[in-house]
Amino acid sequence: MGEAIGPMLASAVAVALSPLPLIAVLLILASPHGRANGIAFTAGWLLGLAAVVASVVAAGIALDPARTTPTWSSWLKLGLGTALLLLAARQWRERPRPGRVTAPPAWLLSIDRLTAARSAGLAAALIVAHPKTLIPAVGGAASIAAAPTGAGVGITTGIGIGIGGKAVAATLMVLLGSLGTLLPLVVHLVGNDHARHTLGEWRAWTATHNAAIMTAVPLLLGAEYLGAAVSGLA
């Protein structure tokens, strides 16, 4: 199963470190209906990420059911890595300058007015409409799909990982990629003064380092994707 889990770990961590969903869930939890909306947001994130990962894994297995590593994965990683590097370069150019105030996105200003259903929809939208989240999700799922498949449908076989093993790896990726929303929710549900203080510190830290994270994570993951693509195509 390591053939599927190992290559997707960096992608899962990149999804978990995406600042926008973390900022969103922290603000939702601080809103008047924080508990219900926070649970709905986290559920929407889990389901949205699971849908993306499952779709890519299923499509990859259907594209190449052979027992060897397919080349489509390397070409895909080449394109995704290039896109991530371009996103990192744009983020660096658009980083906040000293003395300048950047207006927050419109959806952040309306978080206090969200319902539970809209909170779940916002979470799904932050996955599919935000390239710095969608690209790592697709890349990690592609790594799982491209792992050599054994002849059986169990977790492992003698010549590769079974379909069941890929399902386990996909589930693990969804859980790891959701830590950025799951952890704040768990801390909030504890409900004591220390928990509220911790969430406030996380909110302040994320707001301060948002630009750096959104530059560094795509840069490092893009380089990793390009390296994997070159190695696979060589």
Image: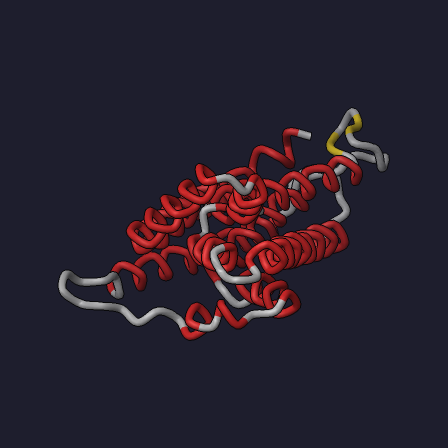
Q: Quadrant of the image for the N terminus?
A: top right
Vertical order, 30 against 129 (above or below):
above
Could you say which is closer to the camera, residue 226 or residue 40?
A: 40
The answer to whether residue 223 is left or right of residue 191 is: left
Could you say which is closer to the camera, residue 219 or residue 61?
A: 219
At which x and y percent is residue 89?
30, 59
The furthest residue to the left: 99
Q: In this view of the protein, can residue 177 be seen by the observer? A: no
**Residue at the image point whose x is 56% and y is 37% from the top:** 7
**Residue at the image point whose x is 77% and y is 29% from the top:** 156
At which x and y percent is residue 52?
65, 57
The colour style of the image is secondary structure
The answer to whether residue 187 is left or right of residue 82 is: right
Q: In this view of the protein, can residue 172 be seen by the observer? A: yes
**Residue at the image point whose x is 51% and y is 59% from the top:** 28
The quarter holding residue 67 reads top right
**Residue at the image point whose x is 74% and y is 33% from the top:** 161
The answer to whether residue 226 is left or right of residue 167 is: left
The furthest residue to the front: 193
The furthest residue to the top: 158
Vertical order, 73 against 132 (above or below):
above
At which x and y percent is residue 56?
67, 55
At which x and y percent is residue 189?
58, 44
Q: How many marks?
A: 0
Could you say which is closer to the camera, residue 133 or residue 78?
A: 133
